[in-house]
Amino acid sequence: MSASSSSQPFSTESYFQTQRPPAGLKEKSEKMHQFVEKWKAVNGKKVVLVTSGGTTVPLESNTVRFLDNFSAGTRGATSAEYFLSQGYAVIFLHRLHSLRPFSRHYSHSLNPFLDLLSIVPSSSGSSSSIVVSPDHTKSLLPILQAYHEAQSSGSLLSVEFQTVNDYLWLLKAVTASMASLGRRGMFYLAAAVSDFFLPEERVAEHKIQSLQGTLSLEMDQVPKVLKPLVQEWTPEGYIVSFKLETDTQLLIPKSRAALSRYGHQLVIGNELHRRKYEVVFVERNSMSKPEKGTGDDRIKGTATPPIMESGESEKLDVAGLEQKEEYKETWLRLDDLKDEGGKGRDGEVEIEELIIKELLDRHQRWIDARE
Ligand code: 9Z3
């Protein structure tokens, strides 16, 4: 498979001009818009968009095969629960069939729900009944209560995507609605988004036949939509992106590079195998000045084009970024949470509890700093 393309890279603009919107976009966008409007009318209510799960890249339009991203959606589904418990209204934009808030505790592979249940035999000819086994009741109760609370208040809206194209169009649409929340809106972009895609004109209509021998694919780079999202679509939103690496050495320099390029508030770095136990918050040192002509200008409210256009290679001046003192890093580790006596709802410690706790303060400060 070839990962390079000889054609002109897609900018965000040319992407949306040439790639068709997915079926159902209008209805889903309208639902998200109504949700935002409902909560905007509630004084002081904060709204967060949580994106979650992997995106697919179909190889055929009658799709039999597709490329996928590993994410199960644990980070997003877990975080959504903690945001709800902290009073946020949550738009949960997630990959079809990935983990969802509340039901994630009973995923079919880890904790099949049938294992929770016991049959109570009939005593006098009436039919048998089913109950939750007593040893599961204690852990299920708070989950069910929180789920019912989210249902009755209408504070959780779940919207599905499957392909990277679905994701990009839905992200654009929901951001347009959330922009009107100003600083009350938070973007928590935890979905594992493909870096490469096949433009629709190069997607085979029917199942690719094996008769042709080897299969070569030339994929285009997905435009970096974080750039217009931060600088044009929602200049006031509090934006948190995630950076995933498998080489720990790259985590901090690449997170700094993303901050510098896009000018948003926070990058949460995580290494693939340690992601459930530790993450690093990378942000601008409040004393440091944004660089002129980079995405950093956004923190002064004067966004100008960033140093790197979409489609350019991600060459990193690691040494340069390491010398700068304008970034600070805060590591969050599960041990820190245990020390404070925290624990997840089902008794297991979850790093998302710590992440959301840290974000609350930062988001509030962002709101309070409004001029
Ligand atoms: C993340 O880094 C998430 O934390 C994970 C969560 C995908 C690792 P799980 O769903 O995993 O709990 O299994 N998300 C962002 C990944 C991503 O695509 N980041 C892009 C990048 O690293 C930038 S937006 O380049």
Image: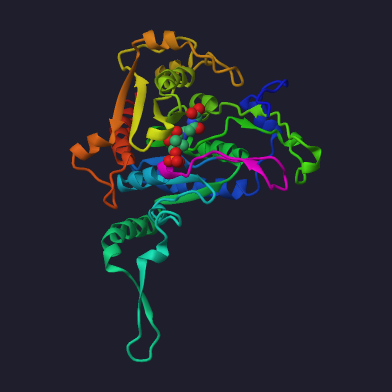
Task: Report if residue 317 is visible in the image.
Answer: yes
Quarter of the figure that contains the N terminus: top right
Tally of numbered discs:
0
Which quarter of the figure is the C terminus placed in?
Answer: top left
- Numbered range of the magenta stretch: 55-76
- Asked if the magenta segment contains residue 68, the reply would be yes
**What x and y, as percent, mark residue 236?**
43, 28
Visible in this render: residue 187?
no
Residue 211 percent location from the top left of the image: 81, 42
Is 155 placed left or right of 9 in the picture?
Answer: left
Q: On the image, which quarter does residue 228 sit in?
A: top right
Residue situated in front as seen by the camera: 51 or 60: 60
Tell which residue pokes out farthest to the right in this image. Answer: 211
Residue in the image at 59% along x and 50% along y: 27
Secondary structure mostly seen in magenta is loop
Q: Nearer the viewer, residue 18 or 55?
A: 55
Picture layout, residue 357 above or below residue 128: above
Q: Position of residue 334 (x, y in %)?
A: 28, 36
In this picture the colour scheme is rainbow
- Residue at the spot 77% in from the left edge and 42% down from the top edge: 210
- Residue at position x 69%, y 47% in the image: 63
Q: Relative to residue 144, is residue 301 depicted above or below? A: above
Horizontally, residue 336 falls left or right of residue 166, namely: left
The image quadrant of residue 76 is top left
- The answer to if 189 sits in the magenta stretch is no
Location of residue 161 with respect to 246 vertically, above or below: below
Q: Is residue 279 left or right of residue 176?
A: left
Residue 142 spot, x, y in % from top left = 28, 57
